[in-house]
Image (cartoon, coloured by chain):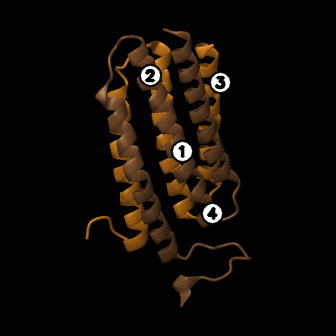
């Protein structure tokens, strides 16, 4: 039963990532694209954790932690670039 | 693994997947940037938190102990998602992103 739930969840998160890519391509303004990228890295973290549960190993959690930190820094840098015109002033 | 643990892990997995999917549908279908900001930043943190909690239960039910990485990722996501949403909203206000026609007022124009 848990295997079926795992596969259904993987399908749901993959569909969510595809919807984010649709917004990333279509988005009319730059903040829409940055928001889509922000949601996309959170979905990538969820997919990595589901992969870890599927394979029964805990090895990939460090990669998920790195993606979380770097994604937050990237989002803040892009938003600051949109607001001020430069990242570090 | 006991049956109760299996039911709990399955329910948490399905809850997390449903929340993530609902957040992405909100991102794809809502009409305006400021309404679009609501969907992913609220739903996706709950979704990833539920998936992470199911991972914690799975590995502790298998006898692998409780890892610190899952809890660290959850706490970090719960701390940083509102911050990035706030910064994105400020940037969109500064740029002057177009809003819906029936938006009542724009306080940042005055």
Q: CA distance from mark 2 to mark 1?
A: 20 Å
Q: Look at mark 3 in the image and give the residue it sits on.
A: A8
Instruction: Report the residue marked by disc 1.
Output: B44
Q: Chain of mark 1?
A: B
User: What is the C-alpha distance between the residues marked 2 and 4?
Assistant: 35 Å
Alpha-carbon neighbours of circle 2 within 10 Å: few (<14), some, or many (≥20)?
some
Q: Which mark, by number, is residue B35?
A: 4
Answer yes or no: are tags 3 and 1 on the same subunit. no
Residue ranking furthest to the bottom: B110
Task: Determine the secondary structure under disc 1.
Answer: helix
Judge left or right: residue B103 versus residue A47.
right
Between marks 2 and 1 in the image, the one whose residue lies nearer the viewer:
2
Image coordinates for residue A10, horizontal then vertical, percent: 59, 26
Q: Quadrant of residue B53?
A: top left
Chain ID of residue with mark 3: A
- Does residue A52 appear in this view? no
Label 4, secondary structure: give it: helix
Q: Is residue B4 above or below residue A44?
A: above
Q: Which mark is residue A51?
A: none
Q: Which chain is the one coloured orange?
A: A
Numbered disc in front, either 2 or 4: 2
- Please tell me the colour of chain B: brown
Residue at the spot x=64%, y=40% of the render?
A: B21
Res A14 quadrant in image: top right
N-terminal label among 2 and 4 = 4
- Secondary element type, mark 2: helix
Q: In terms of sequence position, does the residue under pointer 2 or pointer 1 come before the other?
A: 1
């Amino acid at each position: 039963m848990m295997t079926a739930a795992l596969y259904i969840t993987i399908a749901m998160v993959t569909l969510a990532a595809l919807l984010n890519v649709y917004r990333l391509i279509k988005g009319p303004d730059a903040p829409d694209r940055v928001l889509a990228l922000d949601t996309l890295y959170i979905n990538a973290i969820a997919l990595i954790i589901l992969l870890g549960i599927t394979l029964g190993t805990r090895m990939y959690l460090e990669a998920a932690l790195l993606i979380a930190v770097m994604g937050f820094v990237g989002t803040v840098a892009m938003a600051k670039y949109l607001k001020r015109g430069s990242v570090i002033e | 693994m006991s049956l109760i643990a299996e039911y709990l892990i399955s329910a948490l997995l399905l809850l997390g997947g449903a929340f993530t999917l609902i957040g992405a549908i909100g991102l794809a279908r809502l009409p305006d940037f400021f309404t679009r900001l609501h969907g992913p930043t609220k739903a996706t943190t709950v979704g990833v938190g539920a998936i992470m909690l199911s991972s914690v239960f799975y590995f502790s039910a298998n006898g692998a102990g409780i890892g610190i990485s899952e809890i660290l990722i959850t706490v970090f996501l719960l701390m940083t998602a509102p911050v990035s949403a706030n910064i994105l909203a400020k940037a969109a206000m500064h740029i002057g992103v177009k809003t819906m026609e029936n938006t009542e007022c724009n306080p940042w124009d005055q």
